[in-house]
Amino acid sequence: GENQIMSDLLNRVTTLPRGFVWGGATAAYQVEGATKADGKGKTMWDDYLEEQGRFSPDPASDFYHLYPTDIKLAQDYGLNAVRVSIAWTRIFPQGYGEPNEKGVAYYHRLFKECIDHGVTPYVSLHHFDSPKNLFDAGDWLNRKNIDHFVDYARFCFTEFTEVKNWFTVNELISLALSQYVAGNFPPNHHFDISSAIQAEHNELLAHARVVNLYKSLNLDGRIGLIHVLQPIYPITNTKENQHAADLYDAFINRFLLDGTFLGEYSDETMALINEILSKNDAHLDIQRDDMEILKAASTRNDYFGLNYYQSQFIQAYDGPSGNEFNGTGEKGTTSFSFHGVGQLVPKAGVPTTDWDWNIYPEGLYDILKRVAREYPNSHTIYITENGLGLKEEYNGEDIIQDDKRIDYIDQHVDAVLRARSEGVDVQGYFVWSLQDQFSWANGYNKRYGLFYVDFDTQKRHVKKSAQWFKALADTM
Ligand code: BG6
């Protein structure tokens, strides 16, 4: 019966370490809704989503009003932490200027609710939701954006002193890649390699300047950033495929890890990056002082937030660049070919989701070991996102049977604990996501939550994964 299934699953990850951070993750724009409430300014998404007409960011999961419900669920189901982000445009509707008091008050209420319920808030300053006004002026490609971000961060640090755990930017690479390479985030450029690498560098600078600022303020708290890491494996072990893996790895993982934790781009990394740039007529502009700023911050991160969903398999490729994005959940509709770098291919025996994401827990183990080995300045690691997107429907009666999600989480937590037992300092795990929320380029039919959200009524329904999550929390 059901208890037997539960205990079989629990037997795999027998127990969580004492004091382990065990949480659920969210992002402001994906959960809050209320995009026009209380003086909020537009993000780069509002007009774009309206024009596109596929789905609306309202009401999302109405977290703006229902946060007490969700925080209570988190507490009831054994979560001792949540990841939330602050919407820059609730604080500064135009990205800068005078703070919007109602927005500020909302986050004080939210953080208090978390703390009162023993659910520690881990707070990011930027989660894909650039202010429209700054987006129009070039977003991260415009270096003035960095100044505005630093000012916004300073305001948050001195205002929200109840927050002790900060992250600067979420997933620099997803933003850069989706905006300028894969073309599925506004401004929808395809294979604009100069913009992508420049955005990576500029966002690293923004992060570094904010870390340096935070440390100079001598606040009582911790700060770091979040990278999503995607291990890249050659599809077969030829020299060409191995080189393709090295190139693409440099572009999406290594350049960012070097910049964050070494405070320099190593010669080997730059050789790979330069090869990609020259093959694609692209260039990167590094200005005087940039590297000093990165260097100073590289030893000051208190922790590292690591998001992991999938690994990639690659083969060498010299044809033209091109890609198709699977934004519908129709299996087998993804393709990605990067001129002079490689082509992503399926790997026999590796299962995929309906959105063609490879399910490969081994990759999480590998990347944790690599980060610990090559980047000791990363210090303590938190898995800040990991989870499985599914199409799910509530039948109005029974509990939602998301055994596939339980399997996914179970296998990945297992990989985390295995790396931990071999000395990698992982102190926590946040499932993506706490409650169902819409997905940026996929809409409302890609659900990740431990709690089902009926987007018409905003009712929450417990999924089996939430029960399993609680059963594990009880072993702590
Ligand atoms: C991460 C983001 O990229 O992955 C989340 O930080 C996002 O905001 C999540 O929702 C899952 O991606 P997707 O495309 O399936 O929603």
Image (cartoon, rainbow, N blue to C red):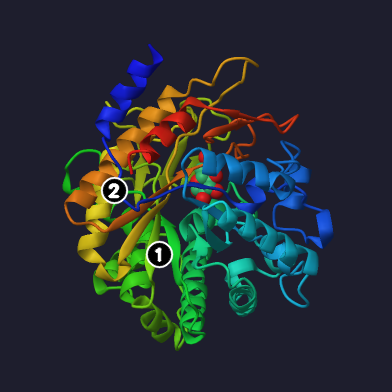
Q: Residue at x 22, y 65 (%)?
A: 374
Question: What secondary structure is marked by label 2?
Answer: loop
Q: Is residue 120 above or below residue 455?
A: below
Q: Amino acid at mark 2?
A: Pro
Residue 90, quarter of the rendered image:
bottom right
Quadrant of the frame with the C terminus:
top left
Q: Amino acid at mark 1?
A: Leu
Near mark 1 (Cα within 10 A), the count class, few <14, some 14-19 or many ≥20, is some
Location of residue 442 (image quadrant): top right
> Where is residue 168 drawn, in percent x and y?
51, 67
In the displayed structure, 147 sits above or below 81; it is: below
On the image, the x and y values in percent for residue 286 come to 45, 79
Residue 312, image x, y percentages: 34, 42
Label 1 sits on residue:
277
* Rendered view: 292 above or below 323: below
Q: Which residue is mark 2?
A: 17
Foreground mark, 1 or 2?
2
Q: Is residue 132 visible?
A: no
Helix, strand or loop status at disc 1 = helix
- Give the alpha-carbon distance from disc 1 to disc 2, as whole Å: 45 Å
Q: Which residue appears at 62% of the width and 42% of the height?
A: 70
Q: Quadrant of the N terminus?
A: top left
